[in-house]
Image (cartoon, rainbow, N blue to C red):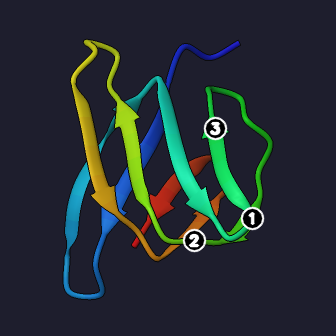
Amino acid sequence: MADSFDIEIATPERLLAREKAIRAQIPAKEGYIGVLPDHAPLLSELGIGAMTYATPDDHRFSLVAVFWKSTTTWYAC
């Protein structure tokens, strides 16, 4: 089992962040989705709210997101 996953935060103009994360909470249309390492891939429409994530050294970040996609790397725009 993986200890972390890659997360990328981007806008249409540029990449804002690319780093390792140990957990993320993402607002979906029907409620929040919790993401941990080895989470199954999925695609979801975002709801209104803040996306939060934490790095392996427990730095925490939050931002407003509008769309996300999961493969082996996590993306938020």
Task: Tell me which amino acid carries mark 2.
Answer: Gly
Tell whether 25 sits left or right of 18: right
Rounded to the nearest angstrom, the CA distance separating label 3 from label 1 is 13 Å
- In x, y percent, where is residue 45? 66, 76
Task: Tell me which amino acid carries mark 3.
Answer: Gly
Decide: few, some or many residues near mark 2? Use Cα within 10 Å; few <14, some 14-19, many ≥20.
some
| Residue 26 shows up from this direction | yes
SS class, disc 2: loop
Tag 1–tag 2 contact (CB < 8 Å): yes
Write the residue at 34% across / 16% down.
56
Rounded to the nearest angstrom, the CA distance separating label 1 from label 2 is 7 Å
Please identify, in this view, whether the residue under mark 3 or under mark 2 is nearer the observer: 2
Decide: few, some or many residues near mark 1? Use Cα within 10 Å; few <14, some 14-19, many ≥20.
few
| Residue 71 shows up from this direction | no
- In x, y percent, where is residue 75? 48, 60
Badge 1 is on which residue? 30
- In x, y percent, where is residue 61? 25, 39
Depth order, front residue of 48/9: 48
Q: Is residue 11 above or below residue 22?
A: below
Residue 37 location, quadrant: top right
Please identify, in this view, whether the residue under mark 3 or under mark 1 is nearer the observer: 1
Tag 3–tag 2 contact (CB < 8 Å): no
SS class, disc 3: strand
Tell whether 30 sits left or right of 55: right
Quadrant containing the N terminus is top right
- In x, y percent, where is residue 10? 31, 69
Q: Earlier in the sequence, mark 1 or mark 2?
A: 1
Badge 3 is on which residue? 34
Q: Residue furthest bottom?
A: 12
Decide: few, some or many residues near mark 3? Use Cα within 10 Å; few <14, some 14-19, many ≥20.
some
SS class, disc 1: loop
Badge 2 is on which residue? 47
